[in-house]
Image: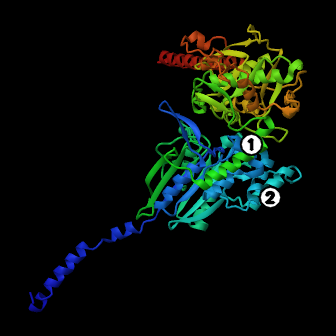
Amino acid sequence: MNKSWRRFVPWIMILCIILQVMPSPVVFAQESEKSLTILFTHDMHDNLLPSKSKQEGEIKTLGGYARLQSAINKIKEVEKEVLLVDGGDFSMGTPFQTIFTGSSPSLRILGQMGYDAVTLGNHEFDYRASGLTKSLVSAMQSKEQLPAIVEANMTFPIDEDGKLTESLTELKAATDAYGVQDYIIVTRNGVKVGIFGVMGEESASMAPMSEVVFEDEIKHAKRVVKELQDKEQVDLIVCLSHSGTKSDPKKSEDEILAKKVPEIDIIISGHTHTKLEEPIIVGDTLIGSCEEYGKYLGIIKVSQNGEKDWELTNYELLPIDNSYPEDPEIASRVAEFKEEVQSQYFDEFGLGYDEVIASTSYDFQTTAQIQANHNESTLGNLISDAYRYAVKKAEGDNYIPITAAVVPAGTIRGNFFEGDITAADAFSVSSLGIGADKMPGYPLISVYLTGKELKTMCEVDASITPLMAEAQLFLSGVNFTFHPKRLIFNKVEDVTIENEDGTTGKVEDEKLYRVVVGLYSAQMLSVVGDKSFGLLSIVPKTQDGTPITDFEKQIIYDETSGTKRELKEWYALVQYLQSFDQENGVAKIPTYYSETHERKVVDDNNNILVILGNPNHIALVVYGVVILLMGLVVLVIVKVVKRRRKHRNLK
């Protein structure tokens, strides 16, 4: 080695050592990676206050916006720039919905809590297009900070003259003024995020009076995603989808959405109230869902690797329990809205929000348990019996005997736990809708069905419930037995009437029977034909047998208080609860409702004669087709055998 180079050797060695201890380019890339934390809720249903929940045999109160705010604040202390979103159905479900049109409580509080964006759920249309219009206008008039509303597949249909109805004209003006749009762009922690919203097919079908049309969410999601990628060039795409997930991936709308539109990075999945302890991963799309009522705060943290792909670094459902103190500002706001509910609604019924109207020594099933099990429900029995009691009381001397009272599972929105039951609790159990009087709460209506249609109603429960859990029916006055293994639309084996005097009787196919049902439930009877592919039909009629075209004309009114008022579903339940014998000055629900009473019997007999026996006209057609096909198969086989024999004989 040249002597002149030798003197550089120590310096070269030192340089090598320095290069070894210096951070590598990979480490630098990791330090410059982008990351984002998304906080999410959905299906809050106006649960501004904590709600009861039973976990591991213990009743707990979870949720409440004041607690939720504390949890959000705690996370923001560590991560300054988070994304906060909601997947729809933020309203309807508690007495706070009674001031939806005049005060828009949830939308305003979500704005105060710092929500970046929300989407609309089907229940935002419970008070129809005009109700949502008033709510949006009320929120805007408050001049308060409000969350953005994103909705990409909502359209406003025009009539034959190319015009919008008056109510749709007003709603469109309100959504335009509010700034409802397909998507928004938000930058958090250096990440440019495109957020858009869609409503799924099932949830849209549950808003029959919305007037708007929700077009194919896949088509519109593809349209918006392309724009977010090509025009906006976002880093991350988040979809607020009010579509939901189900155990069967083929029926799980948000999983289908993820497959059909793989460019979506994250789907916040509302509508089905699903609690996903772990996210569903479809390709590169992550689906998160955190149950209901603000009981949990969903947390998703993603980071971008060197390949510019997003990877999940944390997924968590944070229980909003009493370990989180109430944020004083949000707690004060909730208290203000509660006072409005009292003065503007409960005072009309002579009830207090927290007034104890009854007590129970046992728990009733939760809504999730009711929809997960296809059988008789004690809470369904209680509510349907309440309808019959309240109508008889309201009509007095003009009472016409009721054959059946009907309660669909989808209209049961809460339950009763052991202990006291308040007026607010009773309202929350049957909280849906609005009547012709524009007052919150669906009224009861009176319709007439033929005996054949009564049997069809039982078949709706037996055959459609497996396809749509919300369609399960609970009846007072009509008992039936069904076999789950029998042919669809032929599962019911026996239907009997239980008269008010305790006697039972057979159903006469051509006779008209009086049935009491909620206004919404009657309007949804059209779903029967759709879900049964037109094979089942129920046409509600008046007492003289005329098909009903205006259900509001069949509303039952209560005049016992001296004022003519619609008999609301929830108030019928209150009256029935108050009618029970008292214990220590409080009405006590009898033990009768702690167990079932064979109103709906599930026959699990595996005898083939039982499964195939006593077919109705639908089954006879199916059996005939099967026999015909079998005959054709036999005929083909016989011909083939004859040809082969003839061929062998020729040889």
Seen in the picture, residue 81 relative to 558 is either above or below; the reply is: below
Which circle marks residue 342 in the picture? 1
Q: Is 583 situated left or right of 514 in this image?
A: left
Is there a contact, CB below 8 Å, between mark 2 and mark 1? no
Element assignment for label 1? helix
Badge 2 amino acid? Ala
Res 429 quadrant in image: top right
Label 1: how many residues lie within 10 Å, few (<14), some (14-19) or many (20+)?
many
Element assignment for label 2? helix
Q: Position of residue 111 (x, y in %)?
A: 65, 57
Label 2: how many residues lie within 10 Å, few (<14), some (14-19) or many (20+)?
some
Seen in the picture, residue 192 relative to 444 is either above or below; the reply is: below
Badge 1 amino acid? Gln
Mark 2 or 1: in front is 1
Q: Position of residue 335 (x, y in %)?
A: 67, 48
Seen in the picture, residue 416 relative to 235 is either above or below; the reply is: above
Quadrant of the image for the N terminus? bottom left
- How many tags in the picture? 2
Res 295 quadrant in image: top right
- Foreground of the two, 353 or 556: 353
Q: Is 391 situated left or right of 96 in this image?
A: right
Q: Is 388 situated left or right of 76 in this image?
A: right
- Identify which residue is drawn at 71% across, 37% down: 431
Which circle marks residue 173 in the picture? 2
Q: Position of residue 401 (x, y in %)?
A: 83, 16
Q: Of label 2 and label 1, which has the lower sequence position? A: 2
- Identify which residue is drawn at 66% across, 49% down: 334
Give the residue furthest to the front.
Answer: 584
Which circle marks residue 255 in the picture? none
- Identify which residue is drawn at 67% across, 61% down: 145
Seen in the picture, residue 6 relative to 581 is either above or below; the reply is: below
